[in-house]
Image (cartoon, rainbow, N blue to C red):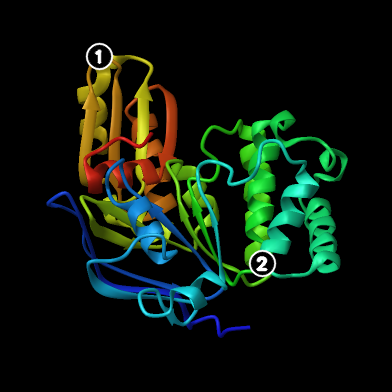
Amino acid sequence: MRAHSEAAIEAVGLRKSHQDREVLCGIDLHVPAGTVLGLLGPNGAGKTTTVRILSTLLRLDGGRASVAGFDVSSRPVQVRRRIGLSGQYAAVDEELTGRENLVLLGRLLHLGGRAARARAEELLSRFGLEDAAERPLRTYSGGMRRRLDLASTLVGRPEVIFLDEPTTGLDPSSRLALWELVRELVADGVTLLLTTQYLEEADSLADRIAVLAKGRVVAEGTADELKRKVGQERLEITLATPALLPQALSALSGLITGELSRDQRKGALGIQLADGLAGVAAAAEALHQAGIEVTEFAQRRPSLDDVFLSLTGHQAS
């Protein structure tokens, strides 16, 4: 097992152009072994292009990249032996059964007949597909297809897995089940690079997140670090009587330390306070002393959606 701090995926100055348009403009990535990097960005930001280069499906035009310790340009075969790739669509045969798909992949990876069958049984059990093992893939639900596709990436016991929007189109229950399987892989020491259009997915699974916009990494850090870039926690207040909003602002004037938002029609305020919970308590007491009744009073942290909108200018899907 690699040391946790050693890079399983590294890219320096990654560049790629397509039809005279620069798709990647010098991307740097560093993913320690045994961790998950979430790659976020609007459509066309370069997420899938990055995955295709790192998985040796596309040649880079500039910079350098290594995966599992091997250069993707000069040692692509060594890289392919150590990675798994799961895209937005299942890379399996519709007419074969679940078991046949996994056994076939094992044979293609030169596991040998007996070892391929044993690995197939192990993965069918791990992904809860034993009861569907003899059914053709075309009869599988969307969630079952995604589980089989993820299982297929594990046949060769990869060190690094690329998941390109793996839960697109899944219902919430299937998405949560796949998240749990991803957590199990990471617990086993696998390194993951995950592209996703679901911000809660990155928030839940990724150790660190890189935000792409127009072919560049515009921010990188933990989810909490990125949220702090947008701003501090805010106190959101809705008054029972909107007309009292000026009086509420007067009562709170000594406590407000940052940006202020207001909606006169709804009688709503969004304010930044100092002193954390003490500031919240002080705000509640100030409004009470002023005789101002509130219907909603809650703290709100910036979300990854706020981060995404702030950094890319796009609303997340």
Residue drawn at 58 percent across, 43 percent down:
90
Decide: few, some or many residues near mark 1? Use Cα within 10 Å; few <14, some 14-19, many ≥20: few
Residue 40, position in %: x, y? 37, 50
Q: Is residue 263 above or below residue 79?
A: above
Residue drawn at 32 percent across, 51 percent down:
232
Residue drawn at 41 percent across, 41 percent down:
300
Residue drawn at 50 percent across, 42 percent down:
88
Q: From the image, tell me which residue sits under label 1.
A: 265
Residue 94, position in %: x, y? 66, 36
Q: CA distance from mark 2 to mark 1?
A: 65 Å
Name the element at disc 1: loop
Residue placed most toward the observer, 281 or 174: 174
Name the element at disc 2: loop
Q: Quadrant of the N terminus?
A: bottom right
Q: Is residue 141 above or below residue 184?
A: above
Residue placed most toward the observer, 274 or 160: 160
Residue 207, position in %: x, y? 49, 63
- Give the amino acid type for the residue marked by disc 2 in the picture: Leu
Name the disc covering residue 109, or none: 2
Q: How many marks on residues?
A: 2
Residue 244, position in %: x, y? 26, 18
Q: Quadrant of the C terminus?
A: top left
Q: Which of label 2 and label 1 is nearer to you?
A: 2
Residue 95 visible at all: yes
Q: Please report whichever mark, 2 or 1, sits nearer to the chain's N-terminal start.
A: 2
Name the disc covering residue 82, or none: none
Residue 254 visible at all: no
Indicate left or right for 194 with 41 as reference.
right
Q: Is residue 170 above or below residue 227?
A: above
- Give the amino acid type for the residue marked by disc 1 in the picture: Arg
Residue placed most toward the observer, 34 or 242: 34
